[in-house]
Image (cartoon, helix red, strand yellow):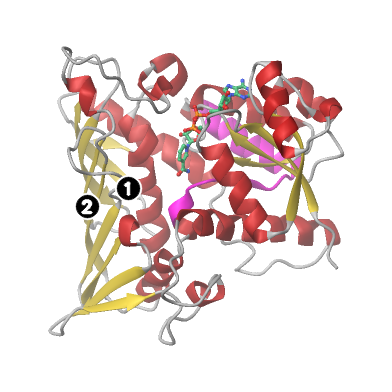
Amino acid sequence: MAKLLQYGMVGGGPGSFIGVAHRKAIALGGKAVLVAGCFSSKIEKSLKTAGELGIAEDRTYADFKEMAKAEAGKLDFVTIATPNNTHYACCKAFIEEGINVMCEKPLCFGIDEAEELVALAKEKDVVFGVMYGYTGNAMTKFAKQLIAEGKIGDVINVSAEYPQEWLIDQLDPSTSRTAQMSVWRTDPKVSGISNCVGDIGTHIENTVAYVTGLHPKRVAAKVDYFGHPLDLNANILVEFNNGASGNFWCSQVAVSHRNGLKLRVYGTKGMLEWHEEDCEYLTFCAKGEAPQKMARNCGYVYGRAAEVAHIPSGHPEGFYEAFSNIYDSFTSTIAKKKAGEPLTEADLDFPTCVDGMLGVKYLHAVIDSGKNDSAWREVK
Ligand SMILES: NC(=O)c1ccc[n+]([C@@H]2O[C@H](COP(=O)([O-])OP(=O)(O)OC[C@H]3O[C@@H](n4cnc5c(N)ncnc54)[C@H](O)[C@@H]3O)[C@@H](O)[C@H]2O)c1
């Protein structure tokens, strides 16, 4: 039996969102076991989570720098699931100890920080993933496959959106209701230069890049703040590196929407459409033909999309499975690297720190454009 990898986590303490999702996704894959953590910056909270998870007290920390030093040589990887303001220092602390990293997005605040992390990861030869989770969905993988095979021809336009409504009360100063979930996102000290574009707009940029292979070359953005320090809504025109056009809309004040990530990719010979809230399906339409709604893990689905199937078609897979698929490639890369075995394309099918860096560059170009009357800005 293959030996389980040993991992640690920073973040994911009591009441938190995404660290818990990481733990469930890793457990689903069954390739790694949690052995250490700094689940909160408060030791009593960190110990509470550690107790619930059966983590030894002497491997529970309130300071991630202390954890990185103490766990050097013991951990195969660390998952960083803290708010944005800690990502840079936390990634750096673990990379410097030679520990492989899976970090949440956005990778960090500044472009210089992102470039430094990419260079440091290379220098220390660590495996460095960034959790852009939607690239783990079977049907985004199938979209990528069909586009690479030329099924829709050359991509000429991408229309993508990510609307949510959870911050709608921010538009009404008279309401006493406040959003309960992770309000740190609206605080520049914790969130960085952006709230909405950083939190969900970067998912659009990355998922489109994964599926199409295209990256924004320049952007022109109308970014809406509604009197708040950080953005809540943005409409972004995109010119891709192949000359194709795009329009990306992200919002946290879009009434009726929960997690409405939707991509529509138009090519010279056809189109593809994928929606996160209906993520088991991919709609394909060839020019002149009726649209086909294709379902995950059916006989006509092949390639990576078929390889990542957990359960038979019709039994819904979703968010956790997508994360788990990313971890499957990430942990496989780590295990094979340790064993000196060659890596396959499937092993390398996870978002990396370079993708994280591109996300930070995109974010800065969008926010800069928004602050300059929607002037075009190069993504660089
Ligand atoms: N990939 C995705 O789909 C996705 C989804 C949600 C959130 N995220 C990202 O995940 C990160 C966390 O978001 P969240 O919604 O889970 O936030 P959260 O507020 O729910 O949880 C953050 C956790 O980090 C802990 N923490 C804060 N500072 C810490 C420190 N210095 N040391 C140790 N622990 C610390 C908190 O105690 C808490 O347990 C953010 O960067 C966010 O952008 C990504």
Label 1: which secondary element: strand
Question: Which comes sooner in the sequence, label 1 or label 2?
Answer: 1
Question: Any magenta on residue 300?
Answer: no
Label 2 CB less than 8 angstroms from ligand 1: no
Q: Which mark is residue 246?
A: 2
Q: Nearer the viewer, residue 256 or 86?
A: 256
Q: Quadrant of the N terminus?
A: bottom right
Q: Amino acid at mark 2?
A: Gly
Q: Residue furthest left?
A: 288
Residue at point 37%, 22% (across, down): 193
Q: Nearer the viewer, residue 194 or 96?
A: 194
Q: Could you tell me if residue 225 is visible in this image? A: no
Residue at point 39%, 62% (across, down): 211
In the image, residue 100 above or below residue 13: below
Question: Any magenta on residue 132?
Answer: yes
Question: In this image, 80 relative to 375: left or right?
Answer: right
Label 2: which secondary element: strand
CB of mark 1 within 8 Å of CB of mark 2? yes
Mark 1–mark 2 Cα distance, whole angstroms, equals 9 Å
Quadrant in the rendering for residue 77: top right
Q: Which mark is residue 71?
A: none
Q: Which mark is residue 216?
A: 1
In percent of width and height, residue 246 lies at 22, 52
Query: What is the magenta range?
Result: 112-134
Question: In this image, 121 relative to 280: left or right?
Answer: right
Q: Amino acid at mark 1?
A: Pro
